[in-house]
Amino acid sequence: MVATEKDPREEVIQAWYMDDSDEDQRLPHHREPKEFVSLDQLTELGVLSWRLDADNYETDEELKKIREERGYSYMDFCEVSPEKLPNYEEKIKSFFEEHLHTDEEIRYAVAGSGYFDVRDRNERWIRVWLKKGGLIVLPAGIYHRFTLDTNNYIKAMRLFVGDPVWTPFNRPHDHLPARQEYVKAFVHKETGDHAVDAAA
Ligand SMILES: CSCCC(=O)/C(O)=C/O
Ligand SMILES: [Fe+2]
């Protein structure tokens, strides 16, 4: 992509550093001034993203290709809203507990929107706003959480390699191999602009 062209993914996925306020989790929680995070910065944390045609997911060749290339054989849908999700209060509370999974978390917003918050290398929260047409992959072992935004509705396609395992391991679960592998690959990794933990 030429430097001046806007990344089409940014129309459906935006990310920014969060403020420290305890206000309603469904609010954007921008810092003042706003501090956006690029999708390339997310990639450096192992978070992958695509913009897809959510109105035609059943016949979408691009989605088919992603599924084939990444082995995402399993697919279902998860609708989150006070009306649609059984045990809504309990579930929304548990989604917002900081946790990790031992496998990728793959979510494609085919309707509605929501926030996936992920920790950066310095433990700061990055809020990733996933809207209709956005697909994200959170790598195994990344600490994260989920909340609806003020629209109170998302319908997400969930993809998985083989039989799905949704178990959340609430923080701290640093001893799990998935966490240790994530840290090795994405936290202690040296990049051009920051040699994290180089002196440790
Ligand atoms: C929008 S899917 C519900 C959230 C979820 O499944 C999860 O694991 C969040 O981390
Ligand atoms: Fe999760």
Image (cartoon, rainbow, N blue to C red):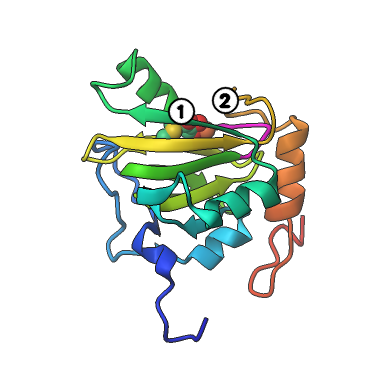
Where residue 85 appears, x then y in whole percent? Answer: 33, 20
Residue found 37% across the figure and 44% down from its top? 110
> Which residue bears the numbered disc 1?
97
Tell me where residue 22 sits by quadrant. top left
Q: Which residues are magenta?
A: 99-104
Identify the residue at the far top of this view: 87
Distance from Cα at disc 1 to Cα at disc 2: 9 Å
Mark 2 crowdedness (10 Å alpha carbons): few <14, some 14-19, many ≥20: some
| Circles 1 and 2: CB atoms closer than 8 Å | yes
- The answer to whether 152 is drawn above or below residue 39 in the figure is above
Where residue 36 appears, x then y in whole percent? Answer: 39, 64
Tell me if 118 is positioned left or right of 132 in this view: right
In terms of secondary structure, where does tag 2 sit? loop
Residue found 62% across the figure and 47% down from its top? 67
Q: Is residue 113 visible?
A: no
Q: Mark 2 belongs to which amino acid?
A: Pro
Q: Which mark is residue 168?
A: 2
Tell me where residue 14 sits by quadrant. bottom left
- Answer yes or no: disc 2 within 8 Å of ligand 2: yes
- The answer to whether 152 is drawn above or below residue 136 in the figure is above
Q: Which mark is residue 167?
A: none
Upstream in sequence: badge 1 or badge 2 = 1
Tell me if 124 is positioned left or right of 17 in this view: right
Where residue 37 appears, x then y in whole percent? Answer: 44, 63
Q: Is residue 125 magenta?
A: no
Q: Mark 1 belongs to which amino acid?
A: Glu
